[in-house]
Amino acid sequence: MNPPEFQRTSFLGNLLKQASLFTLESFCQRMAMGLKAGVDVLKMLDSEAKVGSERHKQVAMNMKNQIRGGETLVGAMKQAGDYFPPMLLQMVSAGEISGGLDRLFAYMAAYYRDLRESRADFFRQLVNPMLQLVLALAVVSGIIYLQGFLASPQVSQEEKFDPLGFGLSGASGLAIFWFFVGGFLIVVGIVAIGIWKNAINCHRWLIPLILPVPIIGSVFANTALARMSMTLSMLLNAGADAVACVRQAFYSTGNEYYIQGEPKASECVQQGMSLAESFQASGVVPNEFVEGVSIGELSGNETESLERLATEYDRRAKVAMSQLCVAASTAIAIATSLLIIFLIIRMAMQYVAMLQSFM
């Protein structure tokens, strides 16, 4: 069950219309600084309407008009369609409930900055392995093309020397080779983006499979739990209703695997169970998180305990993301090396077979 105020947007809409990470980071940073200084939201949005892309300016102006007409900030952001990601909308909703929008925007600015830097670092580490892969494919392409160029037209197809053993030669063979390579890369890209954007609601069944996987599972889990800890801390500090605290904490993760545990946890809170017992009953929250909440409840310092948890989960997520970058670049380098080794062995076997046929 999804909160009624946040409808899912389409995968294509998210991909084409959503603000960039840099835009989201800058927007959150400016909002955090202005709100902390006591600047009115309408003045902040009026300032936003003068910076950034034309679409960002239009979105800010529309938000200003809607808030002036009585709409809440998160309601105005929702009216921007797919421009703001659902996770940011959830966090802003929690910030409005808690009265800590300045802290919320500062946290999200740091989140988008870290995410942007992690992605940049990820692609930087992929440059060398990808260049090796491109060179390997270029060598294969050259061999295929030269095979057709150098082969004599009087030689039958059976007598032609095929160094790769693929049966491809000349321009037509090169076109067939790149058709399959391009098709494979397109499929891999679509699958990767679809998983990242939660196409066809794949996180609900995919995340449980990914979580036990070293490094990759840590990125998903620690990022989600950091947001859950921060949201719960802000809401408890503001004295929000326990059911609202639990509900917003789960939805702030933006992760379908954790969100599915919200109904059970909310039901337990309504029955008078403690927060720690409710989170444990959800069946999706790790014992470490439950213990942190339990210690906070027993000591009466829930907000401080949860803030420490959020900081620790953030640290773990950054470490895991760095390890993921190294693992991905290493995997591509190994795959490229195996491809080159395979081609060398393949060519050697074809050459030996040709010599045997002559003998």
Image (cartoon, grey):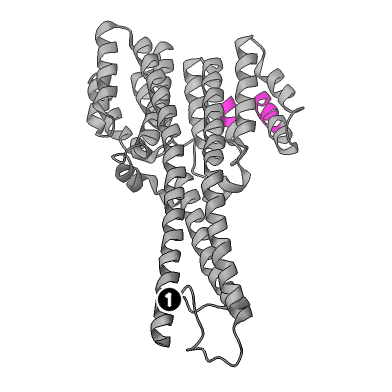
Q: Measuring 41% from the left and 18% from the top, which residue is drawn there?
A: 311
Q: Measuring 51% from the left and 26% from the top, which residue is drawn there?
A: 111
Q: Is residue 109 above or below residue 191?
A: above
Q: Measuring 39% from the left and 26% from the top, which residue is drawn there?
A: 316
Q: Nearer the viewer, residue 50 or 135?
A: 135
Q: Is residue 169 above or below residue 294?
A: below
Q: Measuring 47% from the left and 43% from the top, which residue is drawn there?
A: 329
**For the residue carrying disc 1, how many other residues have a C-alpha within 10 Å: few (<14), some (14-19), or many (20+)?**
some
Mark 1, secondary structure of its residue? helix
Left/right placement of residue 281 relative to residue 44 reads left
Instruction: Let me know if residue 271 appears in the view.
Output: no
Q: Position of residue 206 (x, y in %)?
A: 35, 47
Identity, as a three-letter code, of the amino acid under mark 1: Gln
Asked if the magenta segment contains residue 69, the reply would be: yes
The total number of labels drawn is: 1
Q: Position of residue 153 (x, y in %)?
A: 61, 90
- Residue 82 falls in image quadrant: top right
Which residue is labeled 1 in the image?
Answer: 350
Q: Which residues are magenta?
A: 62-76
- Residue 297 falls in image quadrant: top left
Q: Nearer the viewer, residue 355 or 221?
A: 355
